[in-house]
């Protein structure tokens, strides 16, 4: 009911904006900086969300020219995004966001929605409503309305209806073919793109080794990263009754997400979650008896720390927990790239480790990791979170990573370079759309090669590009 109230409120604001601004053109004056608002899920120490937006900002700034744009990014906590997003301005997103959408979006020439799970009900309808509301409000005011690196999947009725009605005048670049097809079938114009985390430059390998040594690593043993989540307590939903009981009596603490939002709970959720954690623990314990590795448990988002703690208690030997609550995205990704192998239920743990050629496998709750392994042509390296005989599958995956690491690394390297090309095409699509709407805006990248549409690549990525482009050419 509360989600429906939120959705109806946002719909009403968009309808009013459509009537008031019908026929009014997008205006920009020569010499004026192009002002863009980046709307995403940042400030919750979700490493993947922060990394992809960081790179989105770098790419858009490169395309537009730093002296010709003013970029602003939304955060839920200034403290948790301190030092992130370069020189971009940060503004706080209020919990009750509909009035904010109506008052904030008019200050900009356009909005770029940058949440990966942009058009999905898997995590929270409130998040999808925020993304659709931002895009729809910008489109209703005839401003730039762009979804960048979007994923589309199963949606409940209202978010799906809202997407189809209010995003038809937006321009969406999807991060995979499946999402593009779904959006096009809903009447939303979508082009093919990718994720934007590929170009991220983390802290140095020396910094990664320093963190690992602080957590008990001997400097030589191969490091195994395990990235668990709770796949079964999504979506979150608003519940004022639970919020009141939590505040007054201390109930529902374990299922509390934030504000008046709570995770899905119940006996079935508990059973499935326990099976998932036990399966990972059993597979890792069995593998460690046969191979010397130093396991680390990585919480890519703050809420994952609970899963890491529960899994830690099930392992035969202790494994340190490295949490995004305490480690910033630059250091955490550096650690991931220093690992020798990884098994993960977090999509961006795999993506951000790939430029380091870390052999990885997935235990997936949805289509994202499955699609990624399909892109790598390594479909055998993913299993479902509720798959039968999951302990055996986890053990098997770890052995494949160990025994076939060269083959896997080669596939990863090729995929990273392919995705860099896709990210460059994505930048070109954005540039073309911008100049279709604002032909008079200076074209900085016109005539540039594909690298001209990417943020500056760090040396390791440049080496991958040189290696695999030479292989393709030969």
Image: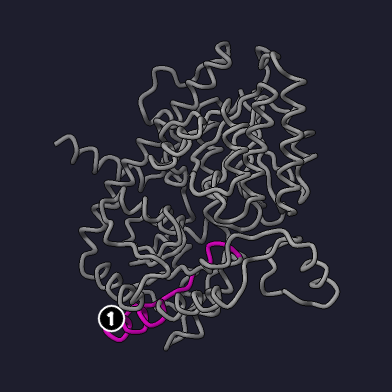
The answer to whether residue 243 is seen in the rendering is yes
Q: Residue at x 49, y 23 (%)?
A: 431
x, y percent for residue 380: 26, 61
Q: How is the image coloured?
A: one colour
Name the residue furthest bottom: 316
The answer to whether residue 334 is seen in the rendering is no
Closer to the camera, 137 or 93? 137
Relative to 426, 254 lies left or right: right
Q: How many marks?
A: 1
Closer to the camera, 445 or 402? 402
x, y percent for residue 447: 39, 17
Q: Residue at x 67, y 50 (%)?
A: 126
Residue 34 versus residue 132 in the image, above or below: above
Name the residue furthest left: 474
Residue 393 versus residue 21 in the image, above or below: below
Relative to 384, 58 lies left or right: right
Magenta-drawn segment: 280-302
């Amino acid at each position: 009911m509360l989600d429906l109230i939120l959705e109806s409120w946002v719909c009403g604001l968009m309808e009013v904006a459509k009537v008031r601004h019908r026929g009014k053109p997008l205006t920009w004056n020569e010499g004026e900086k192009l002002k863009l608002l980046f709307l995403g899920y940042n400030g919750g120490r979700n490493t993947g969300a922060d990394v992809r937006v960081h790179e989105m900002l770098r790419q858009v700034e490169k395309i537009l020219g730093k002296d010709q744009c003013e970029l602003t990014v939304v955060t839920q906590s200034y403290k948790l995004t301190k030092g992130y997003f370069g020189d971009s301005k940060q503004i706080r997103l209020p919990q009750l966001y509909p009035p904010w959408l109506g008052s904030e979006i008019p200050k900009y020439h356009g909005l770029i929605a940058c949440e990966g799970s942009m058009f999905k009900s898997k995590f929270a309808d409130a998040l999808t409503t925020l993304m659709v509301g931002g895009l729809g409000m910008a489109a209703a005011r005839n401003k730039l309305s762009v979804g960048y690196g979007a994923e589309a999947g199963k949606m409940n009725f209202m978010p799906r209806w809202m997407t189809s009605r209010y995003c038809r005048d937006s321009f969406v670049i999807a991060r995979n073919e499946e999402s593009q097809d779904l959006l096009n079938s809903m009447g939303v114009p979508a082009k093919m793109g990718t994720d934007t985390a590929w170009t991220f430059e983390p802290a140095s390998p020396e910094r990664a080794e320093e963190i690992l040594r602080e957590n008990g690593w001997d400097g030589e043993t191969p490091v195994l990263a395990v990235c668990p989540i709770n796949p079964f307590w999504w979506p979150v939903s608003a519940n004022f009754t639970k919020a009141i009981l939590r505040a007054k009596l201390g109930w529902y603490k374990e299922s509390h997400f934030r504000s008046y939002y709570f995770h899905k709970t119940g006996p079935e959720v508990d059973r499935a979650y326990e099976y998932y954690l036990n399966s990972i623990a059993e597979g890792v314990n069995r593998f460690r008896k046969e191979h010397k590795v130093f396991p680390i448990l990585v919480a890519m988002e703050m809420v994952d720390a609970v899963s890491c703690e529960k899994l830690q208690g099930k392992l035969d030997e202790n494994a340190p927990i490295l949490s995004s609550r305490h480690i910033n995205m630059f250091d955490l990704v550096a650690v991931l790239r220093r690992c020798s192998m990884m098994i993960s239920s977090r999509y961006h743990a795999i993506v951000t480790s790939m430029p380091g050629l870390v052999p990885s496998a997935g235990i997936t709750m949805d289509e994202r990791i499955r699609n990624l392994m399909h892109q790598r042509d390594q479909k055998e390296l993913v299993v479902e979170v509720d798959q039968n005989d999951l302990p055996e599958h986890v053990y098997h995956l770890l052995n494949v990573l160990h025994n076939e690491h060269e083959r896997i690394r080669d596939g990863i390297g090729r995929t990273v370079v392919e995705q860099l090309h896709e990210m460059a095409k994505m930048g070109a699509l954005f540039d073309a759309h911008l100049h279709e709407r604002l032909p008079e805006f200076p074209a900085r990248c016109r005539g540039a090669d594909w690298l001209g549409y990417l943020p500056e690549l760090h040396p390791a990525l440049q080496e991958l590009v040189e290696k695999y482009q030479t292989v393709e050419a030969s």
